Amino acid sequence: MTNTTSNAKSYFDLHTEGYGRLQRVREVPVRGGRRAQPFLACTVAAFVGSTKDPVTRYFDVKVSGAEAKKLVERYIGVDDPKQRPLVKFRLGDLWADPFIRTSGDHKGDPAASLKGRLLKAELIDRAELAQLEQYELITRGIGYLNRPREVTPKDGDPFLSCSIGALAGPVDEPDYRYINTIVTTENAQHLVRRCVQAIEAERKVLIAFRLNDMKVDAYLRTKDEHAGEPAASLESKLIHIGLIKIDGQQVFPTAAPAPVTEDASATEDADTAEGTVEAPTAEPVQDEPVPAPEAEEPALAASF
């Protein structure tokens, strides 16, 4: 989170880190007369999954970090795929931008792009990548836990899902990024299940989270005056919960964490959120129905 000169928190961080290539580096003109300055933009083609056969997630980003600008601007106009640089990157403030395809075989279909700000980028060589077995696309932040549910699909294995209203932007006027997640690790599943009772009682459950593999799902709205308009939801895998507060009281971890951890900043963010931010009263209602669980399992641990 960004600090002011008084060392007070001023910004809720929602950061995504990973490995990938920079492409489509360009200066984007801005309307507004002579004073309007173009901004530097690019696409980050992020790798996810096995290093032998990774999936690519594309992020259309504005280059914000000073050092990142120095690196990225060197590749303006470079179109040769063989010259696209390999980088380790950090993005901020992800959001989904839905649209309707206007050409091609999928003309008229809904689609969406992932957007954000490129905060950091550093060149890496293939030797460093060769040491990896898996590419991870990690997103860290804080947010309010909602809608935990056990889902048993007709075809496939049962899973635990939940949504997170992640905080992003200025502390005095933050935005929410609603992220639908599948809870994939045993520890995270254990903690989410312990929060079910509090959520059902409409208590505020704030968590510090870590996600892997952010992606976007586009669809067409089907209800009300927005029927036919494109929309999109963020989707990811919840792999770690480092902190839980219920109605402002920390319930996990029960002991004070070590000062130097990945969750230290998130703990400070959570303290700021509890003092300045109201929890969302409800998530935006999506037109696409959420799969209803066919069977619910009992909680595996005592509730908080």
Image: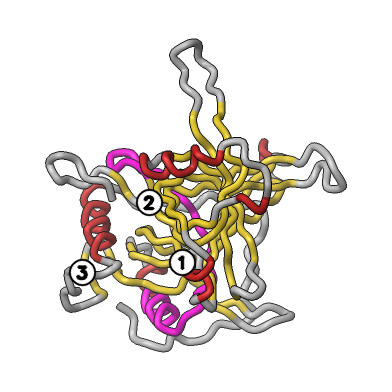
Label 1 crowding class (10 Å Cα cut-off): few <14, some 14-19, many 20+?
A: many
Q: Quadrant of residue 250?
A: bottom left
Sequence-wise, which precedes: disc 1 or disc 2? 2
Q: Is residue 287 left or right of residue 189?
A: right
Residue placed under numbered mark 3 in the picture:
260
Q: Amino acid at mark 1?
A: Leu
The span picked out in magenta is: 169-196
Q: Is residue 268 visible?
A: yes
Residue at screen point 60% across, 50% down: 84
Q: Is residue 237 visible?
A: no
Alpha carbon distance from label 2 to label 3: 22 Å
Give residue 11's position: percent from left, percent from top: 30, 45
Provide the secondary structure element on which disc 3 rests.
Answer: loop
In depth, the one of 124 and 275 nearer the eye is: 124
Find out whether residue 190 is within the magenta segment. Answer: yes
Query: Given this view, does label 2 or label 3 mark the residue nearer the observer?
Result: 3
In depth, the one of 227 and 76 nearer the eye is: 76
244 vs 299: above or below: above
Label 3 crowding class (10 Å Cα cut-off): few <14, some 14-19, many 20+?
A: few
Residue placed under numbered mark 1 in the picture:
211
**Residue 167 got which mark?**
2
Provide the secondary structure element on which disc 2 rests.
Answer: strand
Residue at screen point 41% across, 67% down: 210
108 vs 17: above or below: above
Query: Given this view, does label 1 or label 2 mark the residue nearer the observer?
Result: 1
Sequence-wise, which precedes: disc 2 or disc 3? 2
Alpha carbon distance from label 1 to label 3: 20 Å
Sequence-wise, which precedes: disc 1 or disc 3? 1
Find out whether residue 253 is within the magenta segment. Answer: no
Give residue 271's position: percent from left, percent from top: 21, 57
